Structure formats: C-alpha cells, structure tokens
Amino acid sequence: MNQYWIAVIGTSAIAFALKYSGHSVPEKWLSHPKIQKVNVLIPIALLSALVAAQTFTEKSKLMIDHRLLGLSVAILALLLKAPFPVVVLSAALSSALLYNLSI
C-alpha cells in the first residue's frame, strides 16, 4: 500500500467522522439564534469565494480577462433587478462576445 492509498483512506475516515459528528449535534445547539445567523451567511460566503477564484485566477496565476466583463454585467443586471435567467444569459453572452473578439 503506497502513500496515496493511505491518504485516501485517511481522508475518507476523517470525512465520515465529520459527517457523523454533524448528525450527532443536539438540536438545541443548532436552533440558537447566533448559529442560525451564521448558517444563513455560509453559502453566500462560499459562493462568493468560488466566483472570485474562478473569475480572477487561472491555475496559480492572477488573471483579468473576459470573465471580469461577464461578472460585471451580472452584477449590473442584479442591481437593475433583472430575473435570474436574464442575469446568467447576459453575463455569458457578454463574456463570450469579448472572448471571441479578443482571439
């Protein structure tokens, strides 16, 4: 058994232990108001970090390219209260247009 299999088995055991411990938390702890406020914000923070990482990085380099235009158009559409499909399509189309013009 090489080091990769040991890492895979160890990581799997840790993931199982974390999931099991999450189901073992008492309900009264989870219903605390401060925990509820934090739980609401976690998905927003994770999604924002994912968007920033995907927009401004490529492999290990910081990049500014056509994806920044798509993100900017999406933010503008959200500020103008556009429906979600319009936000996604306008961001994708503007990013694709700039990408095709720059090649």
Image: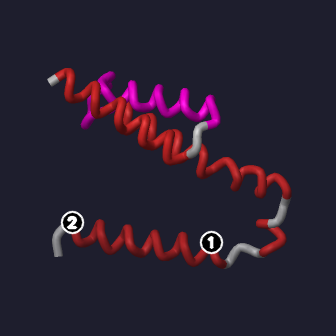
Q: Residues within 10 Å of mark 2 (few under 14, many from 20)?
A: few
- Residue name at image x 38 percent, y 73 percent: 12
> Which comes sooner in the sequence, label 1 or label 2?
2
Q: Which label is found at residue 22? A: 1
Q: Quadrant of residue 33?
A: bottom right
Q: Which residue is mark 2?
A: 3
Image quadrant occupied by the C terminus? top left
The image quadrant of residue 71 is top left
* Residue in front for this viewpoint, 59 or 96: 96
Which residue is painted at 69% across and 55% down in the image?
39
Q: Which numbered marker is on residue 69?
A: none
Viewer-proximal residue, 28 or 2? 28
Mark 1 or 2, closer to the camera: 1
Stretch in magenta:
57-81
Does residue 79 appear to the left or right of 27 in the view shown?
Answer: left
Name the residue type under label 2.
Gln
Q: Position of residue 34 (x, y in %)?
A: 81, 52
Relative depth, front residue between 9 and 61: 61
**Which quadrant: the N terminus?**
bottom left
Q: Are marks 1 and 2 in contact (CB under 8 Å)?
A: no
Q: x, y (%) of residue 64?
A: 33, 22
Q: Is residue 74 magenta?
A: yes
